[in-house]
């Protein structure tokens, strides 16, 4: 193989190869990083929620009269909801999973760690706080791996002061395994006392939830949103939100019924919002889906344009070198020799581009991970990117190279 | 001469329709991707009150515990920033200073207008509970009436200001000044109606979404305690000894939930105000508050404020970066194709040289060809960008349940993903730039070749 | 060396069928120097293409160096061209991106030849054409005559049995032409068979035989200088006889 001659030929018409190598370099840097960013987002979007998303919906009641009494209205609402045909469970809750609001409090196994002068130290973890009525765990459809849900008696009635809802704490809590493992690494959380800071409440852990995700987020908060405490309480005030789980396939019918009749059960209120949980989850993810689609489409175009560039350069080379290709054939090159010449030439250009691209990709990856709190780009992506570009390059050059190989040796004796 | 060049350029482009189409499409795709992302970036990085950019300052203090623990600190991207809101007691204390020309303390709440006749639906209104200077400070335009005075804050007087939308919804758009409105169970008198006003991003309170509409109802600050109004925004308790639970605890604990802004037009005022803040926190430290040893009190202008809140967002920045890289690939690509095209047609240029055209003539003719390709690509790119932005809007916007039917909301969504005239010129500039970047060298190279080289070879 | 029996070659387009060669019969002995003449379009280039295995024949039989090559595959033909035939073209056909050394090396690359052997042959053939000092130049830096000498060096580097020259002096002035012709005669004298297509009657007379082609057929053969087959080459200078039409 005439590598040296090939290199010197490339050097003499270097603008084209340099352009293609530059395109390959940028393409590699873009595609590898975009692939990784997209992968992180897709992972995030497709994370399990742990709750029965498809059969859940939420509905919020807003009161506008001063004598609205949630202590009466809320239990009655829950009873009514549970009596509807098609409803499996219903509960009043302060948070909507996969929705937009969040309540976070510090929790620990030791009350003194929460009152420490100077701030929270080791042994304190942030947790998402769900306050909900008796069958909240069953309503969400999360899986208990130990213990039980709340007992009816543990559920606190609504706080008199709407602002005090958050400190309206029951004597027992159910927490996710993720949180339990952080505070009790030995796995003996059940039956222990969980202390909660800022509200300063202790409660006995009576149940462990295998897994639940409050919201899909990336970065350090992702773990926090899987650390969940559920407290038996009635977080009802002027505004009261209910989670309802229906039997499979009955959700839309139940929602229609709720929209028609529920507000009228009590005077002085109206239905302020209602949404299927699947729609909430989709809305929560819409921004990220848009981002993934945008980045994916642009990256695909980058690859496409680079492939067009490779085909274009090769086709141009073939067109301008017809005579010398014919001569090469005349002096004894086989079709395979010609094909190989183009494939090797392209492979060299792609490889030089890929080498520069690797450096570029790593630099971009480091910059991205610093700027946007992303984990470092794994090397596997780089390797995959290089191999993919090699294959694409060979594929792109294949047709022009075939055309070059088909040039008749008799071209050499043609005068024009 | 120019028309002649133009004709030659078109003839040349028509000679290789596929190559020309490839170049135009490559530039168009690059420009479309860039414009889609730049438009989004541009809309998000707006300067909502640029004419007062050097006068308005967000005020923040740092009452946090000295060592915010690992688990919590790691959730923050900038643990060095003070909390971006202030506590109730600090807000009240700052409000006593007469150094700022104007000052506001405020938060977001919610009120419901009860049905006024049977069959009418209640209307929930996002409410801004604020001190009097809000309207003058942020240049809020009024259609009817005015805002209230500091005395009304103190009293508090039962007065409210409505948004244009709320006035439309409740009073069919007529002048409602003097009318009474029952909010939850309390009667208020309308004293003003503000005109369409939509600072984007909504800089004065970035808690409930940076790109949302301003509130529909404005209420004097004194009602905070009088009605024990719940905060609808973000409450962040920044010390371990803070108390959560009950309204009184919220007023006295180190929980931040209020926005504080000061109008400080002169450098002297700003210096004096900074000194005032530091004095205040030093004083408080003696009472066991502000446990951090070094003062971290900041007065922040609007642009810095928007940066601290990361209003533009990582996704948008990444998208712009990727799109510009794509455009660069398109430029390189067009560069190569253009060079190939010119070299292939070199004998024709050689003939023109032989017939008396100068180097400059040849270069100019080729440059015009390049610019035409750039402009065609730019035009197609704009069309593609429009389609792309519409598609992105459809993908990203979902109806939010319980949200009001304010038509301004749709307009806001539109404006966040629409190209204005400024964007049109950016597209034009990008198109010319790509064309010239891609074509300058090929045109120069063709111009530089001597006519004999063209004519002699086969 | 070359035996053509009834060879025919037809070019077809949608409208016309051109018989570039018909019932072409020719026998060339090893060591012979044959000049091919004829007007434009007479078929002499087609003859050269067929003789040089650049194109396949449509009918007849072609025996090259004792081997019937009428039915060979493309690869087999490439191999024969590479190992047994050297080409010299009117337009020189040097590869413009490569320097003279690399140009001469090109055909040697297509056979498995060890590098030192390649180097030896390149240097000796460049020496022979008097271009040893220019081997690092690219073709554009050389005059036409030098380029053609480089092309000759490329043709002889592979030590072929036959050299096919297509108007080797067509693009050169008289002085240069004479130099090239001298070189070809030398090469022939060392035993290499040469077939040369030419327009130039003077050059043609320096060959052993002149074959004149009209309409794809041999019209006349002139014998100028009889070939003496002497071991180790050498060239006879005996009587010339006016040719007679066959």
Image (tube, rainbow, N blue to C red):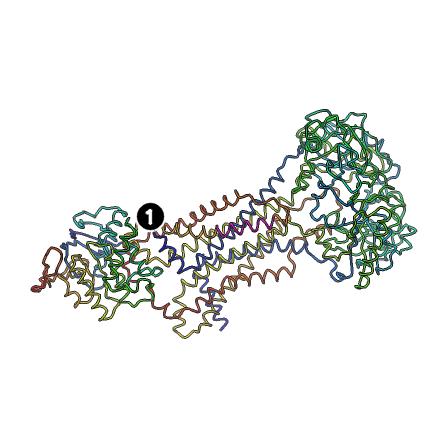
Q: Residue at x 10, y 59 (%)?
A: C227
Mark 1 residue crowding within 10 angstroms, few (<14) / some (14–19) / many (20+): few
The magenta-colored residue range is: A355-368
Among the 4 quarters of the image, the one containing residue A277: top right
Question: Residue C213 at x, y = what percent?
Answer: 17, 60
Q: Residue at x 62, y 55 (%)?
A: B38
The verdict on residue B43 being magenta is: no
Question: Residue A40 at x, y = what percent?
Answer: 60, 42
Q: Residue furthest right?
A: B155
The verdict on residue A360 being magenta is: yes
Question: Residue B191 at x, y = what percent?
Answer: 87, 54
Q: Which is more toward the observer, B380 or A293? A: A293
Location of the C terminus of chain B (image quadrant): bottom left
C120 left or right of B384? Answer: left
Among the 4 quarters of the image, the one containing residue B420: bottom right
Q: Is residue A14 above or below residue A65?
A: below
Residue A388 seen by the camera: yes
C147 left or right of B344? Answer: left
C98 left or right of C205? Answer: right
Q: Which residue is mark 1?
A: A336
Q: Residue at x 82, y 40 (%)?
A: B241
**Badge 1: chain ID:** A
Q: Is residue A55 above or below residue A289?
A: above
Q: Is residue A174 above or below residue A5?
A: above
Q: Is residue B401 above or below residue B329?
A: above
Question: Residue C79 at x, y = what percent?
Answer: 26, 49
Residue B142 seen by the camera: no
């Amino acid at each position: 193989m005439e590598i040296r001659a090939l290199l010197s030929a490339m050097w003499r018409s270097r603008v084209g190869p340099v352009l293609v190598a530059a395109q390959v370099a940028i393409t590699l840097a873009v595609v590898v990083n975009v692939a990784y960013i997209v992968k992180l987002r897709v992972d995030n979007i497709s994370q399990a929620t742990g709750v029965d998303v498809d059969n859940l919906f939420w509905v919020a009641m807003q009161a506008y009269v001063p004598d609205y009494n949630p202590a009466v209205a809320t239990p009655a609402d829950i009873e009514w909801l549970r009596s509807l045909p098609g409803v499996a469970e219903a509960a009043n809750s302060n948070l909507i999973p996969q929705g937009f609001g969040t309540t976070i409090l510090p929790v620990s196994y030791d009350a003194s760690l929460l009152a420490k002068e100077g701030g929270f130290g080791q042994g304190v973890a942030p947790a998402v706080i769900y306050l909900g009525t008796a069958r909240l765990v069953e309503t969400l459809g999360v899986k208990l791996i130990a213990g039980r849900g709340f007992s009816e008696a543990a559920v606190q009635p609504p706080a008199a002061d709407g602002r005090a809802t958050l400190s309206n704490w029951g004597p027992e809590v159910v927490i996710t395994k993720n949180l339990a493992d952080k505070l009790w690494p030995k796995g003996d959380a059940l039956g222990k006392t969980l202390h909660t800071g800022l509200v300063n409440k202790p409660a006995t852990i009576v149940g462990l939830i295998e897994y639940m995700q409050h919201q899909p987020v990336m970065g350090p908060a992702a773990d926090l949103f899987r650390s969940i405490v559920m407290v038996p309480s009635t977080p009802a005030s002027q505004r009261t939100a209910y989670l309802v789980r229906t039997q499979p396939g009955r959700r839309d019918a139940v929602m229609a019924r709720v929209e028609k009749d529920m507000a009228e059960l009590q005077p002085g209120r109206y239905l302020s919002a209602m949404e299927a949980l699947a729609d909430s989850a989709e809305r929560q993810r819409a921004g990220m889906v848009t981002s993934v689609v945008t980045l994916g489409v642009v990256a695909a175009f980058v690859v496409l344009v680079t492939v067009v560039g490779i085909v274009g350069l090769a086709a141009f080379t073939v067109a301008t070198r017809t005579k010398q290709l014919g001569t090469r054939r005349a002096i004894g090159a086989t079709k395979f020799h010609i094909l190989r010449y183009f494939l090797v030439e392209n492979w060299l250009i792609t490889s030089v581009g890929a080498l520069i691209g690797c450096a570029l990709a790593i630099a971009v990856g480091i910059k991205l991970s610093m700027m946007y709190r992303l984990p470092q780009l794994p090397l596997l992506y780089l390797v995959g990117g290089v191999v993919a570009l090699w294959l694409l390059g060979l594929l792109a050059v294949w047709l022009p190279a075939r055309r070059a190989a088909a040039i008749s040796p008799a071209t050499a004796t043609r005068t024009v | 001469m120019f028309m002649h060049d133009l004709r030659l350029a078109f003839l040349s482009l028509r000679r290789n329709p596929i190559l020309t189409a490839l170049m135009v499409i490559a530039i168009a795709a690059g420009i479309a991707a860039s414009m889609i992302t730049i438009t989004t970036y541009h809309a998000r990085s707006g300067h909502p009150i640029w004419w007062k950019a050097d006068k308005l300052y967000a005020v923040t203090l740092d009452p946090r515990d000295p060592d915010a623990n690992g688990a919590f600190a790691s959730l923050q991207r900038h643990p060095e920033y003070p909390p971006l809101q202030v506590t109730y007691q600090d807000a009240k204390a700052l409000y006593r200073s007469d150094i700022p020309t104007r000052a506001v303390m405020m938060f977001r709440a919610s009120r419901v207008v009860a049905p006024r006749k049977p069959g009418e639906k209640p209307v929930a209104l996002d409410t801004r509970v604020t001190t009097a200077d809000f309207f003058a400070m942020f240049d809020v335009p009024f259609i009817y009436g005015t805002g209230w005075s500091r005395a009304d804050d103190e009293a508090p007087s039962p007065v409210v200001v409505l948004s244009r939308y709320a006035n439309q919804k409740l009073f069919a758009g007529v002048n409602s000044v003097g009318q009474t409105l029952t909010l939850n169970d309390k009667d208020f008198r309308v004293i003003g109606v503000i005109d369409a006003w939509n600072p984007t991003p909504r800089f004065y309170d970035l808690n409930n979404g940076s790109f949302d509409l301003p509130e529909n109802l404005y209420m004097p600050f004194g009602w905070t305690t009088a009605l024990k109004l719940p905060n609808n925004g973000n409450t962040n308790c920044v010390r371990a000894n803070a108390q959560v639970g009950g309204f009184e605890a919220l007023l006295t604990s180190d929980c931040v939930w209020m926005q504080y802004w000061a109008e400080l037009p002169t450098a002297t005022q700003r210096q004096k105000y900074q000194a005032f803040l530091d004095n205040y926190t030093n004083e408080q430290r003696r009472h066991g508050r502000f446990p951090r040893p070094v003062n971290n009190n900041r007065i922040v202008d609007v642009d810095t404020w928007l940066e601290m809140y990361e209003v533009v967002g990582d996704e948008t920045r990444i998208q712009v970066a990727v799109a510009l890289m794509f455009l660069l690939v398109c430029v390189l690509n067009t560069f190569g194709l253009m060079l190939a095209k010119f070299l292939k047609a070199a004998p024709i240029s050689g003939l023109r040289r032989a017939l008396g055209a100068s180097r400059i003539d040849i270069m100019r003719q080729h440059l015009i060809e390049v610019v035409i390709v750039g402009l065609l690509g730019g035009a197609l790119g704009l069309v593609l960008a429009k389609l792309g932005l519409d598609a992105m809007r459809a993908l990203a916007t979902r109806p939010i349940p319980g949200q009001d039917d304010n038509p301004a909301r749709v307009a806001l969504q539109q404006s966040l993903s629409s190209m204005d005239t400024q964007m049109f010129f950016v597209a034009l500039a990008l198109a010319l730039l790509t064309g010239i970047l891609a074509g300058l060298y090929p045109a120069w190279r063709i111009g530089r070749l001597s006519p004999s080289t063209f004519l002699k070879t086969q | 060396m070359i035996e053509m029996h009834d060879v025919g070659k037809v070019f077809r387009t949608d409208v016309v069928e051109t018989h570039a060669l018909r019932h072409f019969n020719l026998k060339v002995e090893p060591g012979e120097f044959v000049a091919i003449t004829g007007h434009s379009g007479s078929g002499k280039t087609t003859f050269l293409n067929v003789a040089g295995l650049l194109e396949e024949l449509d009918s007849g039989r072609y025996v090259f160096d004792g081997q019937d090559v009428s039915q060979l595959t493309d690869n087999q033909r490439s191999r024969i061209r590479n190992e047994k035939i050297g080409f010299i073209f009117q337009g020189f056909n040097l590869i413009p991106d490569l320097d003279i050394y690399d140009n001469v090396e090109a055909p040697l690359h297509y056979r498995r030849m060890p590098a030192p052997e390649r180097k030896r042959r390149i240097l000796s053939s460049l020496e022979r054409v008097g271009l040893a000092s220019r081997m690092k130049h690219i073709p554009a830096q050389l005059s036409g005559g030098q380029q053609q000498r480089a092309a000759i060096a490329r043709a002889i580097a592979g030590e072929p049995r036959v050299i096919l020259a297509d108007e080797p002096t067509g693009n050169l002035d008289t002085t240069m032409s004479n130099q090239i012709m001298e070189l070809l005669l030398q090469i022939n004298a060392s035993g290499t068979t040469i077939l040369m297509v030419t327009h130039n009657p003077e050059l043609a007379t320096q060959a052993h035989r002149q074959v004149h082609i009209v309409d794809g057929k041999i019209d006349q053969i002139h014998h100028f200088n009889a070939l003496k087959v002497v071991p180790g080459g050498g060239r006879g200078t005996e009587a010339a006889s006016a040719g007679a039409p066959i």
